[in-house]
Image: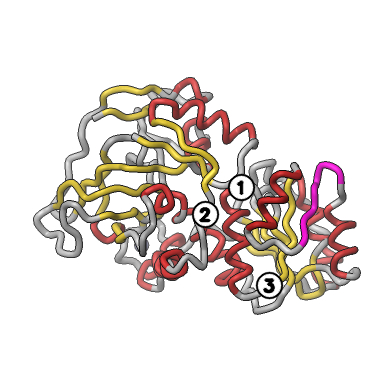
Amino acid sequence: MKAIRFHEHGGPEVLKYEIAPDPKILANEVLVTVRACALNHVDLAVRAGVPAWRIPLPRIVGADISGDVAKVGSLVTQVKPGDRVLLSPGVGCGQCEMCFKGLDSACRQFTVMGVFNDGGYAEYVKSAEMNVFPIPGDLTFDEAAAVPLVFLTAWHMLFTRAGLKPGEDVLVIGAGSGVGSAAIQVAKLVNARVIATAGADWKLEKARGLGADEVINHTRQSIGEEVKRITGKRGVDVVVDHVGAAVWEACFDSLATYGRLVTCGMTTGADLKVNGQGLFGRQRTILGSFMGGKGELIDVLKFIGQRKLRAVIDSVFPLQEAAAAHQKMEGRDFFGKILLHP
Ligand SMILES: [Zn+2]
């Protein structure tokens, strides 16, 4: 099959469009013809190399995959060739305490598609049957690929970790990112008041289109001052962050008493300082969050199928232009998901 692989870690230029062996399925596995694969930050991290991870090379990345079933193993019972499916981006063992509790992303063997196994930057990908889901409603392949990882992450952050309640105030950092554009919508499901930040006015317009009530352009406005103004100095109940160091202080200081700061990423650095006085004195909570469980993915897909949550697609590149797609993501000049078409 044709695939994008890399044989060494590095910049986007290490991504090579080449012939790779077709995946061989086991009895409990499904072979999927990839129709669309969405980019995520994890793809960029695996390509660049993460010192703590020893990634087997060559590698095919890509965690968010939609397609049709091409072939099924002899023990597969729930899907058949021709079915339109999407794949769970997270892969747990399926038989440990955490997996049984629905906390797959806390499974000790948990991995993301395209990290320690091959992902979706290819004509075909294989998956265990338990990670294959029918595409809900009349969603296109592009929409189906744009949803799983970021909506699952936003859902887990807001509901499972931060315990968002109806009508609370939520600050969403980086509205143009996949997680940001999903978090705005997930928070609006329970009529939260959403304040969204971005670095460009055109992104703030789009954020309003997704339901953001208030917007902050962080290149010319102070996030802390604007939150104070909008909330009448009260602060917000929940902050959704995935950026880390660059906005950490502003996020923490924007929390109301009993506020919760939930973070799922540190794209600008992970070296954080915590104002201990502000933590206990204001009874605030800092929460880490990492993807989510398959049960939560099923919840997300229900709302996606009813179009109460919508995939946000920035652009589509042919598979052979994966390097250009990575450059676009690194350049931050996008809103929503960037997709590849094999
Ligand atoms: Zn497990």
Numbered badge on residue 150: 2
Q: Nearer the viewer, mark 2 or mark 3?
A: 3
Q: Is residue 154 left or right of residue 142?
A: right
What scheme was used to colour the molecule? secondary structure
Instruction: Return the x and y of residue 91 as percentages of the image width and height.
Output: 36, 55
Q: Name the amino acid, label 1.
A: Ser
In space, the residues marked 2 and 3 are separated at their CA atoms by: 19 Å
What type is the residue that disc 2 sits on?
Val
The residue that appears at 63% across and 68% down in the rendered structure is 187
In the image, the segment drawn in magenta is 214-220
Residue at the limit of the structure toward the bottom, as seen here: 166
Q: Does the segment drawn in magenta span residue 218?
A: yes
At a point 64% along the width and 74% down the height, the residue shown is 164
| Tag 3 residue | 192
Classed neighbour count for the residue bearing mark 1: other residues with Cα under 10 Å, few (<14), some (14–19), many (≥20)? many
Q: Nearer the N terminus, badge 2 or badge 1? A: 2
> Is residue 62 depicted above or below 135 in this figure?
above
Q: Which mark is residue 65?
A: none
Residue 106 at x, y percent in the picture: 46, 62
Label 1 near label 2: C-beta < 8 Å?
yes
Image quadrant holding the N terminus, namely: top left
Furthest toward the left, the residue is: 74
Report the image quarter containing ligand 1: bottom left
Point out the image quarter for the C terminus.
Answer: top left
Lateral position of residue 219 relative to residue 5, left or right: right
Callout 1 secondary element: loop
Q: Is residue 98 visible?
A: no
Q: Do tag 2 and tag 3 residues touch (Cβ < 8 Å)? A: no
Q: In 3D space, how far apart are the residues under numbered discs 2 and 1 (Cα atoms)?
A: 9 Å
Which residue corresponds to mark 1?
Answer: 177
